[in-house]
């Protein structure tokens, strides 16, 4: 079939989950592989609609993990280790009603309360809200912006951190093309954002799929003495490893955000995506 004979339709991209991933190491000298089933997953059909999930308390331990031969006491302690616990979670992805002359739109929400990870990281509250709006008669790419979004009560052990987000920049430049143009033309903006983004010289780095990666976190304050900060958004803490805050992945048709990502454990919390495109 020739593409000109194909009936036009819009493909929504929206989804969220509260926490999920895979834990590969729970002991300094022992590798394992434990899936953390996604808590409160919500995935929107490309045709649009609504998907909504609520979850009460969830706890994942190591009882079903496979370990090599270990001393009995070591094995007992590992089996009892709580990898992840969540007090409650909520995820939403829904499209707005279509209509003549109206842009295609959708909203994504990921909310998580009372998160705890093995090693001493905890989060009192995380909220991610994104909105996509796409007038296909005027623009090639959707405009993707943030609604209310926050990281509150993040603790490393007993130390509570203050996390400052930069949502205004991403709302002002709501497409990747606008963001890139502003980045290149505005020296002050480029100096502010460069430490937070993967760079290729003085330009934003793009992977083979054309994605740009950085963070919506402007700064983190109140670190414990044994932790250090890289680029204003990545924490290096011996008890957990590398903790990436507010990570954003931007492409022409989608933005994906994860409020907290623990690299060594491969666990993500407060994650969602928003965007879309027309076909053909």
Image (tube, rainbow, N blue to C red):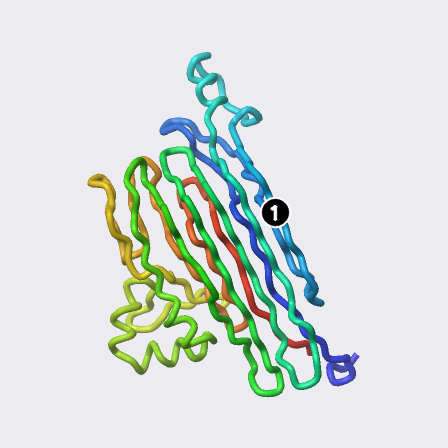
- For the point 55% across and 36% down, which residue is it? 58
In the depicted structure, whether residue 13 falls above or below residue 87? below
How many other residues sit within 10 Å of disc 1, few (<14), some (14-19) or many (≥20)? some
Q: Residue at x 77, y 80 (%)?
A: 7
Q: Is residue 231 left or right of residue 178?
A: left
Q: Quadrant of the C terminus?
A: bottom right
Q: Depth check: 12 or 207 in front? A: 12
Q: Which residue is mark 1?
A: 54
Residue 164 located left or right of residue 150: left
Q: Residue 6 placed where, x, y %?
A: 77, 80
Circle 1: element type: strand
Residue 17 in picture, x, y percent from top left = 56, 51
Q: Considering only vertical position in the picture, is 266 above or below 218? A: above
Q: Is residue 131 left or right of residue 12?
A: left
Which residue is found at the position 27% from the left and 69% from the top? 192
Vertical order, 259 against 120 (above or below): below
């Amino acid at each position: 079939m020739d593409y000109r004979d194909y009936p036009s339709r819009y493909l929504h991209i929206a989804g969220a989950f509260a926490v999920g991933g895979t834990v590969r190491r729970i002991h300094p000298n022992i590798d394992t592989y434990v899936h953390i089933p996604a808590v409160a997953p919500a995935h929107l059909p490309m045709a649009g609609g609504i998907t909504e999930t609520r979850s009460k308390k969830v706890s994942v331990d190591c009882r079903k993990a496979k370990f090599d031969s270990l001393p009995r006491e070591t094995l007992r302690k590992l089996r009892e280790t709580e990898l992840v616990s969540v007090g409650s979670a909520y995820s939403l992805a829904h499209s707005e009603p279509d209509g003549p002359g109206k842009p295609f739109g959708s909203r994504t929400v990921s909310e998580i309360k009372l998160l705890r990870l093995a090693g001493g990281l905890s989060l009192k509250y995380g909220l991610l809200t994104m909105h996509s709006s796409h007038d296909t008669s005027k623009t090639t790419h959707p405009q993707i912006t943030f609604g209310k979004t926050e990281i509150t009560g993040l603790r490393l052990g007993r130390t509570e951190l203050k996390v400052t987000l930069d949502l205004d920049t991403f709302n002002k430049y709501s497409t990747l093309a606008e963001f890139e143009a502003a980045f290149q033309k505005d020296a002050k903006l480029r100096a502010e954002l460069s430490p937070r983004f993967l760079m290729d010289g003085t330009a934003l780095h793009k992977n083979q799929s054309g994605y740009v990666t950085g963070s919506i976190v402007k700064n983190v304050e109140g670190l414990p003495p044994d932790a250090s900060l890289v680029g204003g958004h990545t924490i290096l803490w011996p008890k957990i490893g590398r903790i990436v805050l507010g990570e954003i992945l931007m492409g022409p048709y989608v933005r994906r955000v994860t409020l907290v990502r623990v690299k060594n454990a491969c666990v993500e919390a407060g994650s969602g995506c928003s965007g879309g495109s027309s076909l053909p």
